[in-house]
Amino acid sequence: MRVLYFHQHFSTPQGSGGIRSYEMARTLIARGHRVTMVCGSHMAGQTGLSAPFRRGRRQGAVDGIDVIEFELKYSNKDGFLRRSITFLMFAVRSIRVTFTESYDLLFATTTPLTAGIPGIVARWIRGVPFVFEVRDLWPELPREMGVITNPVILSLLDWLEWVCYRSAHRLIGLSPGIVSGIIRRGVRPEKVTMIPNGCDLAIFADKSAPWRPPQVQAADLMAVFAGAHGKANGLDAVLDAAAVLRQRRRPDIKIVLVGDGQFKESLMLRASREQLDNVVFHGLVNKTRLAGLMASTDIGLQILANVPAFYYGTSPNKFFDYIAAGLPTLVNYPGWLAELVRDHRCGFAVEPESPSAFADALIYAAEHREELRDMGGRALLMARTSFDRKLLGDRFVEWLSLSAVESSRVSVPAKEGDP
């Protein structure tokens, strides 16, 4: 089966972005399929291509994946208008690819929602099976966050969401809330499955060279947030907790914020203004470097703004990186991840917008190191048994294969060992 795979923010492990699409493409290839990945250029990503762009495009093989990269630079520091233009340009260029490439199935993953446009074209004009993966519910999330308020734009996004869902032969949601949201739009439940983000155990569970920023002592409790510093992340909550820790005179607890984004500069200015020496800012790191940091981390921080749509409607990469590294996790909002943490006793679920509760959890962790290690062990067990990327990759390939078989376009290779 030849799969044309669209992910605007594709990255290999050499980048600092999520690598779900890389791993899923590699799983498809391992099962005998061919994959062409179509993507843009991302500040945090690394596509694996280094040749110069020609007419805004470059192409080459990366670990068995045929990668087509458009010279469309994207950063989460960009404003709304610039990001919107980049998304639309990627969709337009992607439509052209749907007519020039040879493929049996088109797969597209958000964000953005415009990633589904080439799938709509493939389904209705070329008659090719289309599988759509939804990582965030649009426009529900930007509407609740107040990022988009124009009723015309929201109506257009509502319409595009509906068309994407109705055009897809099958859909994948990354969280329970996403699956429910798709079904609420009138999609039959049997056409939708949940395949959450997964744990890259080969990267994070294996022994890595541990390291800490110079500001963090070996005896300090180190809590790490590794991800974008944007509006959705609500990282002022971390600084609020750091202020409480400073008031309580706990210099032995350090919070490390790894990454970049639109709000990083303002967060750094606030930390400096309030003399929050217990907060350490660090730049982007690739997955190998991040694994080394995780090997020295005591607790991971899963932080989001207190927006109800986030509770069940997101599947953050960072959470699965934390548990893959055997780290207990502090979650500062309700929802399915907080429930996982409580049910598996592998971290702390604190009420949102409560700096005292946040600080209390970190102080408890610092004073109960043995219990913290036990939590980490349970986190790793959950990662291995429920969220191993290899297991989720098999489900992913099977779901795509069923779409192709149902359309009678291709014969799909059997699993190794099948008759």
Image (cartoon, rainbow, N blue to C red):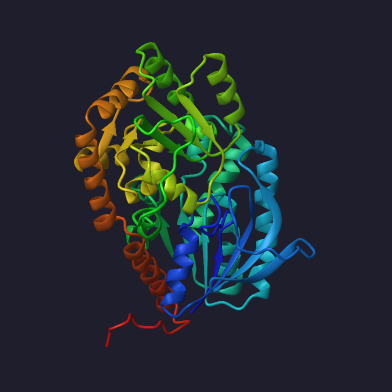
Q: Is residue 4 above or below residue 273?
A: below
The quadrant holding residue 364 is: top left
Residue 120 visible at all: yes
The quadrant of the rendering that contains the C terminus is: bottom left
- Let me know if residue 263 appears in the view: no
Looking at the image, which residue sits at the far top? 247
Rendered position, 132 above or below 43: below
In this view, the residue in front, 3 or 292, is 292
Q: Is 144 positioned to the left or the right of 416 in the image?
A: right
Residue 44: percent from left, percent from top:
58, 48
Residue situated in front as seen by the camera: 281 or 106: 281
Tell me what residue is drawn at x 46 percent, y 53 percent. 134
Percent coordinates x, y for residue 352 in the rendering = 36, 25
- Front residue of 190/133: it is 133
Q: Is residue 115 left or right of residue 313?
A: right
**Residue 119 drawn above or below residue 216:** below
- Location of residue 299 by image quarter: top left
Q: How many marks?
A: 0
Q: Quadrant of residue 83?
A: top right
Q: Residue furthest right?
A: 55
Question: Residue 174, percent across and down?
Answer: 39, 52
Q: Position of residue 338 (x, y in %)?
A: 29, 37
Give me the residue at 61% from left, 68% from top: 67
Report whether 202 appears left or right of 158. left
Could you say which is closer to the camera, residue 416 or residue 110? 416
